[in-house]
Image: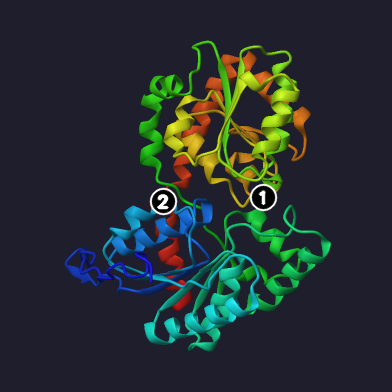
Amino acid sequence: MSALASHPAAASDRVAGAAFQTARPRAAPRRLAILHVITRLDRGGSADCTLLQAMGAARRGHRVTLAFGPSATPSPLLPAALAERGIRFLEIPSLVREPAPLQDLRSLAALVRIVRRGRFDIVHTHTSKAGALGRVAAFLGGRPPVVHQPHGHLFYGYHGPIGTWLVVQAERLLAPLASRQIALSWRGAEEHLCRRIGRPGDFTVVRSGIDLRPCRLARARRGECRRRWKLSPGDFVVGTLCRLEPVKGAGELLEAFILAAATQPRLRLVVGGDGPLRGRLLDRAREAGVADRVTIDGSWLRPEDLLPALDLFVLASRNEGMGRALVEAMAVGVPVVGTAVGGIPEVLEEGGAGILVPPGDPEGLAAAMVRLAADEGLSARFARRARARAVTFGAGRMNHSLLNLYRRVIR
């Protein structure tokens, strides 16, 4: 058993104080027993969101259990979650992301045991694989109310036609096992409904929340961050934080930079993240003669270690549930460019808080880079709008909405 699995699970004794209406007291909301199920707690938006939800509920006095699979590169939020009173961590070694029939059966049996023993008020499942096993386990383990949060979807950009068809069929079959599905955006809900997954009343939009404090404080570290990345005062730095794989548009971002750099000699590109495309991207930068202006850091960075150094953040994804890295950049006060996929248009208020371009369009991305590099006033206006818009995505708002949703589902 790993250190995560054996972490103490002391329940929190904190109870929200009583509120009063004139002379008549109102009872505090009762404590809930909540089970979260997720495949892994690796770096990434779904794990970070899940950990913030678990910590938020525990801090409000609820009893939280988090069941998860092995994690190769744990989320940077995990140490804080492990230190939080009221969260019990249960690692299921067989719970892996890729299809594995025998391991999946073991995981299902383990989850059924957890559900039966836990007497949970609500089961909250996350992502596709854990969402499938968790929903079935809740059905077999006593049928507590279930909310399912896909954190996006796999309907395009991930699999070929057959794989996508299988995903859609599975989600259609599993949809009735959840009392409610949580979408990160209205478009995310629509993309499920147009494939006949669930019904309109099944979906509630809860924006993925971030901890705004580190991002807001990070702006003061701009000089330090730029020195770390060996940037000159006159450099206009374009950057991103993402996994280096096709669905994140890493290739399109580099091609856009190559086009823009031809007319903008002060442009630099800094990419934080790792993945299967890293070697290919470095080779392409050398081939195009811009290797000395491109930095691809293969380590996983904290947002506050890179974002303050940037003059422009670009998220070029082909499929994106919402784009947490985009919101983090906005909270730091960096102007942003995003592709018009998934929840990104809603995050950017359809172009009011940042520039939107079509997915798979390096020329459009390049034009946006050149436009903002050439117009300091426009960049400053977008930065102000982005920072104001980011407040909407605070973790506190997410957790407040989520707990209200739990209580509605339980009732």
Q: In the image, 364: left or right of 354?
A: right
Q: If you read the primary sequence from the N terminus, does the residue marked by circle 1 or circle 2 appear first?
A: 1
Q: How crowded is mark 1: few (under 14 residues within 10 Å), some or many (20 or more)?
A: many
- Res. 365 visible in picture: no
Name the residue at 69% across, 18% down.
261
Pinpoint residue 38: horizontal percent, then vertical percent. Answer: 51, 66
Residue drawn at point x = 67 percent, y = 31 percent: 282
Task: Return the x and y of residue 14 as percentages of the image width and height.
Answer: 21, 66
At a point 45% along the width and 85% down the height, the residue shown is: 113
- Quadrant of residue 22 within the rendered picture: bottom left
Question: Mark 1 belongs to which amino acid?
Answer: Gly
Q: How far apart are marks 1 and 2 (CA)?
A: 20 Å
Q: What element carries label 1?
A: loop
- Quarter occupied by residue 215: top left
- Image quarter in which the C terminus is found: bottom left
Can you identify the residue that label 1 sits on? 342
* Residue located 71% across and 30% down the image: 283
Give the side of residue 315 with respect to residue 14, left or right.
right
Quadrant in which residue 4 is drawn = bottom left
Q: Which color scheme did the rendering employ for the protein?
A: rainbow
* Disc on res. 395: 2
State whether residue 28 is above or below residue 399: below
Towards the viewer: 265 or 149 = 265
Q: In terms of secondary structure, where does tag 2 sit?
A: helix
User: Which of the pair 59/281 is nearer the observer?
Assistant: 281
Farthest right residue in view: 161
Closer to the camera, 296 or 179? 296
Quadrant for the N terminus, please. bottom left
Mark 2, Cα crowd under 10 Å, few <14 / some 14-19 / many 20+, is many
